[in-house]
Amino acid sequence: MELEEAIRGRRSIRKFRSDPVPRNVIEELLDLAMWAPSGMNQQNWYFVVVRGEALQRLAEISRRAFDEHTERSLLQVFMDKPEIVRATRRFFYTLGNAPVALLVYRIATVEGELTDIQSVAAAIQNFLLAAYARGIGACWMTGPTHFESEINELVGVEDMRLQALVPMGYPDAYPFIPKRKKGKVNWIGFEE
């Protein structure tokens, strides 16, 4: 698959088939994720791959994150589109029945939080594009990070910041491709 096709074609998948994603495939995706650029080449990402009972607990935490945090924001942004709020609630409550999920953490570096976040975000994007190229769907979620301490306790992580929860699996449904907003670009020093 060409890179441009992956960039334009990748969607956030929110409904998955029950087929398991083989461990070796997840390992390949993680390897590609870790080729991302990072501030001062610190490579400050840490991944936890979750399935089974721990994944069910993550779905319970995700449900609370929606009820206590995410729903409020969605109602403001999509006040005239209640179907989006309902669909998002359904996804947060079930994680789309994903057979596996990835927790993505950032390790603090001397560069500071902004650089740390950007470095780990690049690794997440690499992961999402590589997954799409292999027919695996995923959805980058930040809402559950409101319950970071509870998730950390569940998976035994200390001294790192939870940046994302990424449910993944083989897609059972593909969302429509929304129009892109007009870019906000300011060209300085270019002649017309």
Image (tube, rainbow, N blue to C red):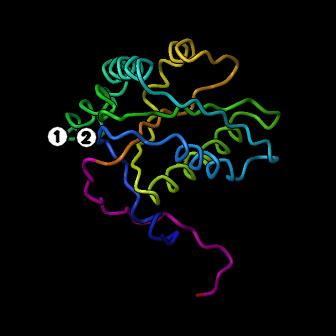
Question: Where does residue 139 sit, x and y in percent of width and height?
Answer: 41, 42
Is 189 placed above or below 15 here?
Answer: below
> Could one spot residue 110 in this view of the protein?
yes
> Could one spot residue 75 in this view of the protein?
no
Residue at 47 percent across and 60 percent down: it is: 133
Question: Where does residue 99 sit, x and y in percent of width and height?
Answer: 37, 34
Where does the magenta region start and end?
Answer: 172-191
| Mark 1 crowd level (few <14, some 14–19, many ≥20, 10 Å Cα) | few
Residue at 56 percent across and 49 percent down: it is: 29
> From the image, which quarter does the C terminus lie in?
bottom right
Is 177 placed above or below 157 here?
Answer: below
Question: Where does residue 118 sit, x and y in percent of width and height?
Answer: 65, 44
Res 181 quadrant in image: bottom left
Residue 33 falls inside the magenta stretch: no
| Mark 2 crowd level (few <14, some 14–19, many ≥20, 10 Å Cα) | few
Res 3 label: none
Amino acid of disc 2:
Phe
- Dominant SS of magenta comes to loop
Res 78 label: 2
Toward the viewer: 35 or 89? Answer: 35
Question: Where does residue 14 sit, x and y in percent of width and height?
Answer: 31, 42
Toward the viewer: 32 or 185? Answer: 32
**Alpha-carbon distance for marks 1 and 2?**
9 Å
Is 1 placed above or below 85 here?
Answer: below
The residue pinned by badge 1 equals 83
Residue at 50 percent across and 72 percent down: it is: 2
Amino acid of disc 1:
Glu
Residue at 33 percent across and 24 percent down: it is: 66
User: For the residue labelled by badge 1, is the local secondary structure a helix, a strand or a loop?
Assistant: helix
Residue 175 falls inside the magenta stretch: yes
User: For the residue labelled by badge 2, is the local secondary structure a helix, a strand or a loop?
Assistant: loop
